[in-house]
Amino acid sequence: KPRGAVVVAANAAGDRRRFAGTQIDNASYGGSMSAERAAIAAAVSAGYRNVTKLAVHGEIPVDGECLQVLREFGGLTAD
């Protein structure tokens, strides 16, 4: 099912921005990406590596792969 996500992330200077992501499914091969990981990738690519908040619209729960990405790039836990 389609999902969307927004993360709030900070850069090294402490500036914060919001980054949006959408679920990316590829029917040709197994290269799908969740909305959360797409939003985190956008933030990290822009230099905002400290994810402080995550909002997901769509089916929950967040999968294990995404939780690992969150642990690597933010202070978020699976609460």
Image: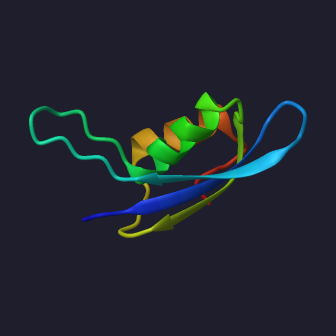
* Position of residue 30 in the picture relative to residue 38 (left or right): left
Residue found farthest to the right: 13
* Quadrant containing the N terminus in the rendered view: bottom left
Q: Is residue 48 above or below residue 6?
A: above
Q: Nearer the viewer, residue 22 or 55?
A: 22
* Position of residue 13 in the picture relative to residue 38 (left or right): right
* Position of residue 51 in the picture relative to residue 56 (left or right): right
Quadrant housing residue 54: bottom right
* Residue in the image at 80% along x and 48% along y: 16
Residue 23 drawn at (x, y percent):
34, 52
Residue 61 drawn at (x, y percent):
41, 62
* Position of residue 36 in the picture relative to residue 78 (left or right): left
Q: How many marks?
A: 0
* Quadrant containing the C terminus in the rendered view: bottom right
Q: Nearer the viewer, residue 3 or 68?
A: 3
Residue 50 drawn at (x, y percent):
73, 38
* Residue in the image at 23% along x and 46% along y: 25
